[in-house]
Amino acid sequence: MKNRSRLVIGNWKMHLSPGEAAAFVDAFRQELPSLPPAVGVGLAPAFPALERVGQGIAGTRILLAAQDVHPEAKGAFTGEVSAAMLKDLGVTHALVGHSERRRFRAEGEAVLAKKMSRLAEAGMAPVYCVGETLEEREAGQTEKVLERQLTAFDGVSAPPPGLVLAYEPVWAIGTGRAATPGMAAEAHAAIRSLLSARWGTAAARGLQILYGGSVTAANAASLFAEEELDGGLVGGASLDPAGFAAIARAAA
Ligand code: PEP
């Protein structure tokens, strides 16, 4: 029997202005009574919308997540946002290592490890994203890639407080081509076994691993039927309040 609860987080990427985000929250709040209480729900707006979303979800059980955080605590880093600033806005979680940042910002494990340290210092939880490209999968490298990405935890003796993992195969993100439930479950099991080797079976068994990559209201139930999947990190389909609510219901 697993003892992990399920969680769905909407990653809005560079979508929804503060005004649009507030309208989303108004609509999504109507859906809340229909959502299973056992499924955690989080929203990850772009930085400018965090405050409005935070105000809109105040008093609800919706978690506020950021899409990124800077690896340094403060200083002369024009245009950047620190963990303490996010904390002040009521943010509890931050994505770290999303493949779009690995790819477009060349973020590697060393900088991602620093981001997770800043989050831990500020009392926030990382949602650490891993996943292989199509080329890597076809070359039989999937597990090797996951292992390398998990080296961001080298020297970390226990899971950072609140840590959530997200398995997001790069080839499935925004492509409309989700992993099959079996493929996702296999990768999740591999990640859990790597985490077991790192921190022990009991600790690894308690960690939530979300699946991300073209999750929709149509395929969510079949993906979440896999016990290895503890929920989803949802991009495009999280921009529609009713659709995102349907995905959360499917995670029950
Ligand atoms: C994501 O960006 O984390 C993601 C999974 O996107 P999408 O659901 O659009 O594939």
Image (spheres, rainbow, N blue to C red):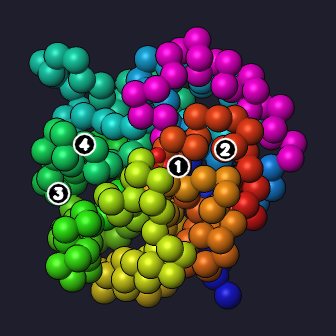
From the image, tell me which residue sits under label 2.
244
Q: Earlier in the sequence, mark 2 or mark 4?
A: 4
Quarter holding the C terminus? bottom right
Residue 248 spot, x, y in % from top left:
70, 53
Query: Does mark 1 have its CB less than 8 Å from ligand 1?
Result: yes
| Residue range (magenta) | 11-34
From the image, tell me which residue sits under label 4.
101
- Residue drawn 76% across the image and 27% down it: 27
Q: Residues within 10 Å of mark 3 (few under 14, many from 20)?
A: some
- Residue drawn 12% across the image and 18% down it: 76
Q: Is residue 159 positioned above or below 45 on the image?
A: below
Q: Residues within 10 Å of mark 4 (few under 14, many from 20)?
A: some
From the image, tell me which residue sits under label 1.
234
Q: Earlier in the sequence, mark 1 or mark 2?
A: 1
Marks 2 and 4: CB-CB under 8 Å? no
Q: CA distance from mark 1 to mark 3?
A: 23 Å
